Image (cartoon, rainbow, N blue to C red):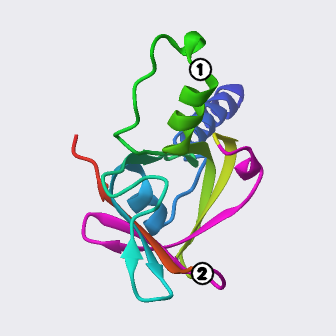
Amino acid sequence: MQVMRSTFWALFCLAMATVPLFAQTHDQKLFVGTWKLVSTEEKLRNGHTRPYRDLGNTALGYLMYTEDGHMCATLMKPARPNWHGEVEDATDAEKINAATGYTSYCGTYKVDEKKHLMFHYPEVSLYPNFIGTEQERPYRFEGNRLVFSAAVAEGEVERWTIVWERAAK
């Protein structure tokens, strides 16, 4: 009887070890991996469009989602001037200039498949006010592209759109 009980518990523990701790839905599985920035766009109320102002039309970036529910996003303007020396020698003006064309945050995420909403929960961020917030991202998949886009209720911008493409290995 003792052998049977030990065998049962060994098999039970082995079976439980194969159960994922972060159960994924269909769309969550589609998100997992690395995405490379294709474009950013703001549609203005006057009918014009422009890339995100702080990043420009040649922005670079990566967005990563892990199976266990973590994410990281980083975007930058590639033409930022180099610093005159090492990080510890950078002037305040160099630091401000570098930060002006850069954004990054990492944390956890969850997906609401029914509403096609991605939620990011930043735990670290270049922009301190992001930390501890819920960032809602309406999404859709178009082939190997991931598109986040939403209307804006007030201000100059009517709609923002950011397009990512699955990164090649």
Depth order, front residue of 153/165: 153
Q: In the rendered image, which quarter contains the C terminus?
A: top left
Please tell me which residue is depicted at 54% across the width and 44% down the height of the picture. Answer: 100
Residue 110 percent coordinates (x, y): 61, 60
Q: What stretch is highlighted in magenta?
A: 127-155
Residue 93 percent coordinates (x, y): 59, 29
Depth order, front residue of 44/113: 44
Magenta segment: does it hold 68? no
Vertical comparison of 47 with 116: above or below = below
Residue that badge 1 annotates: 91
Vertical comparison of 84 with 122: above or below = above
Residue 164 percent coordinates (x, y): 35, 59
Residue that badge 2 annotates: 152
Depth order, front residue of 62/48: 48
Identity of the amino acid at label 2? Val
Residue 122 percent coordinates (x, y): 67, 48
Q: Distance between the residues labelled 1 and 2?
A: 36 Å
Q: Quadrant of residue 95?
A: top right
Depth order, front residue of 135/71: 135
Residue 70: mark in rendering: none
